[in-house]
Image (cartoon, rainbow, N blue to C red):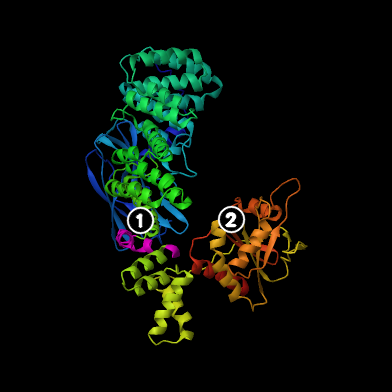
Amino acid sequence: MLKKILNIKLLVLVFCAFTLQISAQEVKTRLQGMIDIPIPGASFSMTYDPKDGPLENVKNISGYAYVFNDYRWEIQDLKMKKNGAVYSADFTVPKNCAFMAFKFYGNTENGLVADTNQDTGYMLVAFKEPKIKMPGADLAWATFRNKDFNGQFGGYFKDFSIDGDATEYWLKKEVEANGNRFPEFFDTYFDVLKKQKPEKFQELGSKFLADFTKNMKGLPEEVYIKVHHIYLFDLNNKTKADSLEAVIKKQFPRGSHVRFKAYQKIMPIADAAERNKAITQFLADFPYSSEVPPSQQYFYDNIVKMQFGYYFDTKDYKSILAMIPTMNFANLNDAYHQNISKALYLKAVDPAVIETMAVPMILQMQQKVNDMSYMQGLYWSPNQATENAKVQLNDELVIQIRMYDMLKKYKEVLETFALLPFEKRYEKASINDIHIKALEAFNKPILEVLKNAARANTLSEGAEAKLKEIYLKEGKKEADFPAYLEQLKKENRPEEKIALMDPIPAPAIKVQTADGKAKQLALDSGKIIVIDFWATWCGPCKKAFPAMQQLVNNFKEDKQVEVYFISTQETKEGYKKEALAYLKEKGLKLDTYFDLVKKGGGTNNESFSKYAAIFKSSGIPRKVVIKNGQIRFTSEGYSGNPGQLVDELTDVINALKKE
């Protein structure tokens, strides 16, 4: 069946063999204890020392292993225990494991940071016995380290990879040792052929596949589907593909291929009612079972989303209540986010009606938070999938708190707060306000909530006033309150250093004043210029204005600082009048201008579009801080916490003053 694979240079052979032998020795710097001959079922404890590596200053380090198990890739968590500055990492080699590659990671302010041993890997090959490798070992060794095959492994390697010749060599070794398992990885061989012999691929690939298909009788449907895919997309041979498709439909009338074709027919249906009928028929023909391969799990996830959305839009809440117990965590979370949360935010459905669905959904999510429904392929390890589910549940609990507040159900508000981890309770000023309101409804003390919100720098104006009132009632001086507030902010939090950007030339800003006059802002006057791009249709923009007013007030006597508010991205008529009326209504005294309309366009974004191009985002609110004609800081959006916004921009201004 197989054509003779061309011999590669002796140097490559020697290098590959040498690499295989020392794989456990090349990692002594940070990971020690990997056994030289791991045998399935064996357990061993490694020691990971992050010193001098990318995780040296990371507080909490976790790890997982990519495992090639019975010719399929899996991902398994390591049992990590911290012991002083180092970690023990316990691992049991799975029953049919042929290869394992360990990865250590930790969350930082700059995102996830990983350690894969300076890009050379923490890798082990498994053995049946001391001199006999497990089936799949050479195949995994060949593909894991090749840039053409390792894309699914979360960027394990960035720069290091073996070349096609070495991959071809180890693949040949796999075929020689385990030819009886060849149908399980023939597609990998085919991919190598495509990469190595592009000029002869059509000829060699067609002959290879013709030989292979002569002996397919009795093989699982998965193999037939792979061959069909190769004929259709790699060899562009529709005749062969159609012929094989007829065989698949006959041999596997309720199999994966027929299921896929049936699912494809649902998606183009535009009419929601007709699509729901098609979904009902699909579920009758192809009920979800253990026979559904992981690659088709998303069919059923999408169907649940569509059904839930259809019933929600048509107010068929009875059908939704029947669905909820059958949904997994990921389905429940998506449906809650896309329907419940959205309807509450837009006030599209009575909160009392929302409650009838939201309560059982949250209950089911609490029960199913560990169901691993976020495990798809190798994207997350089990621990990561579970942690993600917990984060999502906490986010939905916050929405639930907002719903109970709308319903004035303060007992339920407090009960839901109790379900949140401590730090999550104090993330948003608006949620702190609800918490305080609920406590006050039962005449419960609010001081600790106010102080915790102050420590998190998430006090609203109203909450800060309440904290000040309590402070003064204790007989303390009003003049000392700012220092008291600053002290609370600093508790349990390290000193944060503001990160200024490398200077970028600031595009000119031409605007129109409130009375219609043209003006160009002086960006290179030596002053520190703070720009706030906003629009009347932008809710977060307007919610941030009280904080921005505080910033303006704080620096109104400072001749080195100027703050400008520029209305941009407006299309409707009368937006200038509406903007000025809004500012007046709210008692805001902000230096407001209007972006100019581009020639041939109906949107006033002439200046902002230049900044959006620099930041690769047109999102607003957008804060930009400029000094000497250079952009030195920018931020997009609003956290909902006025103190954080004021402090952040104040720190930027002070840092620029010190330059």
The residue positioned 42% from the left and 22% from the top of the image is 261
Amino acid type, label 2? Ile
On the question of residue 189 being in view, the answer is yes
**Label 2 residue SS:** loop
Front residue of 435/355: it is 355
Question: On the rendered structure, is 225 left or right of 552?
Answer: left
Residue 582: name its quadrant.
bottom right
- Identify the residue position indicated by label 2 in the image: 620
Q: For the magenta stretch, what is the residue range?
A: 409-430
- Tell me where residue 153 appears, x and y as whole percent: 41, 40
Q: Nearer the viewer, mark 1 or mark 2?
A: 2
Q: Is residue 222 magenta?
A: no
The number of numbered discs placed on residues in the rendered structure image is 2
Task: Specify the label residue 411 is tagged with.
Answer: none
Q: Quadrant of residue 7?
A: top left
Dominant SS type (magenta) = helix
Q: Mark 1 points at which residue?
A: 61
Q: From this viewpoint, is residue 7 visible?
A: no
Q: In this view, does 38 lie above or below 10?
A: below
- State the quadrant of the N terminus: top left
> Residue 137's spot in the image, x, y percent?
33, 33
